[in-house]
Amino acid sequence: MSPQATLQPELTPHSKNGTSERPHRGVVRVALAGCGVVGGSLLQLLEKRGRQIEARHGLRFELTKILVRNPDRPRATAVAPDLLTTDPQEFMAADADIVVEAMGGLDPAATIVRTALLQGKGVVTANKAVMAEHGAEFAALATQAQLPLEFEATVGGGVPVIRTLRDSLAETEVVSIRGIVNGTCNYILTRLAQGTPYATALADAQRAGFAEADPTRDLDGTDSADKIRILAWLAFGVDPALIEVEKQGIIPDPDHLARTAAAEGGVAKLIAECSMQDGRLKTMVKPTVVPADSDWAQTRDEINLFAIETRWNGTIKLAGPGAGGSPTGSAVLGDLIRAANQLFVNAR
């Protein structure tokens, strides 16, 4: 069975009343769905940082199963063959305290997350499409079962914008959020502003690991729309599945966008926005010409920038790498540590 096959949300044999037995503090069993750019980067970080994590946090992560599409694919980190499976049912039957979902797409990723929560497993996901469509549902399941659900890597790569909205700015009454939220588009638009043709800029982005083999979701604005739905959910409490985004990407003619911006004395950026206006949520993604001397114009390459306007804390800006395996993998690792700590606290 391939990872695209239908996976039914059943409780695994090691579950008791839908709740997995918790380990003693120290060892955390992890099942990883997806071992591409993000999942592979997580494995590299665990290999490089394992001793430091154990010394600092008292946690040792033990991989119990890895769901992949191609078990023969070369990997940057050596993986024992018996850890790999292409069968979602076998993957979900593995003993695990936390499931890390880094597959992308909606199916079978959504079912994996839902099943994990129903089995009493914590979840860490880097999948913005899944959280944009099912975030409210998964949050309710996690809250009911007192399980961690962490998704920092869904928006902003290595920029901690999710944690900022969930914790630091939770009671500051967010007024609006504006951001460069897609590193692929920003990298390409930066190159176009420098005179590089679009085809060359896209190929460079793909070689650098900032663009997928099929970058359509990034270029047509869908990825940015999913991300702004998640941010609007956290800021305003609206179910992301119900949020409609006015969306326009940088295709079909990115070169024309760059030329038009230059003619106007500015720089083209793909900007995502959400705000509450007269009790109605407004969300959009659109190419925007920004002044050449602005913070937006100075945000180049794969860097993301977020401006969060609040009623009680002014405007907060966050910036950092928004694409690439290492920044996103580090966000997943941070979530994994938080999820493990929450499991041990809840087990007391």
Image: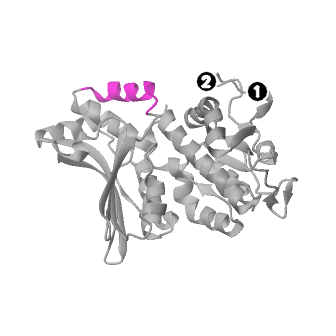
Q: Amino acid at mark 2?
A: Ala
Magenta highlight on residue 221: no
Residue farthest to the top? 74
Mark 1, secondary structure of its residue: loop
Q: Is residue 56 left or right of residue 304?
A: right
Magenta highlight on residue 204: yes
Local crowd at mark 1 within 10 Å, few (<14), some, or many (≥20)? few
Q: Residue 290: horizontal and vertical position, in percent?
A: 20, 47
Q: Is residue 89 left or right of residue 255?
A: right
Q: Residue at x 67, y 42 (%)?
A: 33
* Quadrant of the rendered image containing residue 28: top right
**Quadrant of the snapshot with the C terminus:** bottom right
Above or below — where is 197 with respect to 98? Answer: above
Q: Main secondary structure of the magenta part?
A: helix
Q: Residue 266: horizontal and vertical position, in percent?
A: 15, 42
Q: Residue at x 49, y 63 (%)?
A: 240
Question: What whole-number distance in Å separates the C-alpha atoms at marks 2 and 1?
Answer: 13 Å
Q: Residue at x 79, y 46 (%)?
A: 89
Q: Residue 114: horizontal and vertical position, in percent?
A: 68, 57
Above or below — where is 105 with respect to 170? Answer: above
Above or below — where is 219 with respect to 348? Answer: above
**Quadrant of the snapshot with the N terminus:** top right
Q: Nearer the viewer, residue 248 or 229?
A: 229
Highlighted magenta segment, given as a residue range: 196-210
Q: Is residue 248 visible?
A: no
Q: Is residue 193 visible?
A: yes
Q: Colour scheme used in the picture?
A: one colour
Q: Residue 313: horizontal and vertical position, in percent?
A: 32, 66
Q: Amino acid at mark 1?
A: Ala
Q: Residue 80 has which mark?
A: 1
Q: Residue 76 has which mark?
A: 2
Above or below — where is 85 with respect to 281? Answer: above
